[in-house]
Amino acid sequence: MKSEFFARILSSIILIPILLFFIIKGGYLFNYFILICLLISIYEWIKMTNKKVYKIPGVIFLISSFFSVYYLRNKIPSDYTFFTMTLFICIFTDIGGYLFGKLFKGPKLTKISPKKTYAGAVGGYFFSLLFIFFFFNYAEYISDITILEFSVEKISVSILILTLLISSISQLGDICVSYFKRKSNIKNTGNLIPGHGGLLDRIDGMIFAFPITSLIIKIFF
């Protein structure tokens, strides 16, 4: 557990600044970055599903999912509120799920993914709300140091509901990808990221959260 935990921490320390660099730079750099991530994800998916009937539908889903990332990031070029929210709610949901699951253990959430527990689900919600309170309280300061603009006011009920919804979708996405890994008799989709496995293992929640968030933003905001 300790070696896996420290591998995760080290990977995150390296990956998060790289991710932030491309988000802040935007434009062609960001678009090329998500294109590379898309190609890696498709490669891992095809390798995992092999001759399964859902291989092509999965590829189509990944393309549409990454398009929603592009759409949300470029929808309002001067405002990155919902993009940043979605990205980091997924990240903090994953962190909270992992930490609470390891610390408190308890009953399993589902047989599809044996490591998922009810404690982990609660941890995912808790950490996502923790992030959103931090984000809304320090958005102006974050904007100053990252040169990203956020249209953030006070936390509303709708934002809290959206946070819990994104966190829920992220957790369901994680379970969904676990289901396909289980069907393929593999533990990870790859070994690209130490402590995490493949890229799909890292973004399994995001590929479901971004399309739904984009749809919600387009309809209600």
Image (spheres, rainbow, N blue to C red):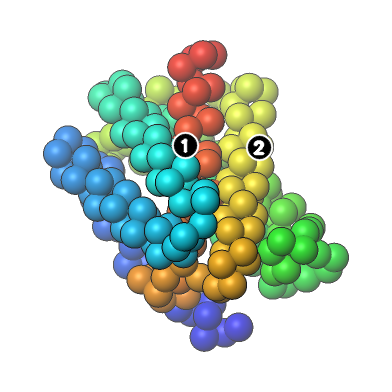
Query: Which residue bears the numbered disc 1?
Result: 210
* Residue 89 x %, y %: 53, 44
The answer to whether residue 183 is left or right of residue 101 is left
Give the amino acid at mark 1: Phe
* Residue 46 x %, y %: 40, 58
Q: Nearer the viewer, mark 2 or mark 1?
A: 1
| Near-viewer residue (176 or 20) | 176
Give the amino acid at mark 2: Leu
Task: Identify which residue is drawn at 66% across, 42% down.
Answer: 168
* Residue 93 x %, y %: 59, 51
User: What kind of element bears circle 2?
Assistant: helix
Q: Are marks 2 and 1 in contact (CB under 8 Å)?
A: no
Q: Is residue 110 above or below residue 194?
A: above
Task: Identify which residue is drawn at 52% across, 85% down.
Answer: 3
The answer to whether residue 3 is left or right of residue 192 is right
The quarter holding residue 192 reads bottom left
| The label number, if any, that marks residue 164 in the structure image | 2
Task: Identify which residue is drawn at 50% across, 70% down.
Answer: 188
| Near-viewer residue (189 or 84) | 189
Q: CA distance from mark 2 to mark 1?
A: 14 Å
Between discs 2 and 1, the one toward the N terminus: 2
Q: Is residue 132 above or below residue 183?
A: above
The answer to whether residue 34 is left or right of residue 154 is left
* Residue 42 x %, y %: 36, 53
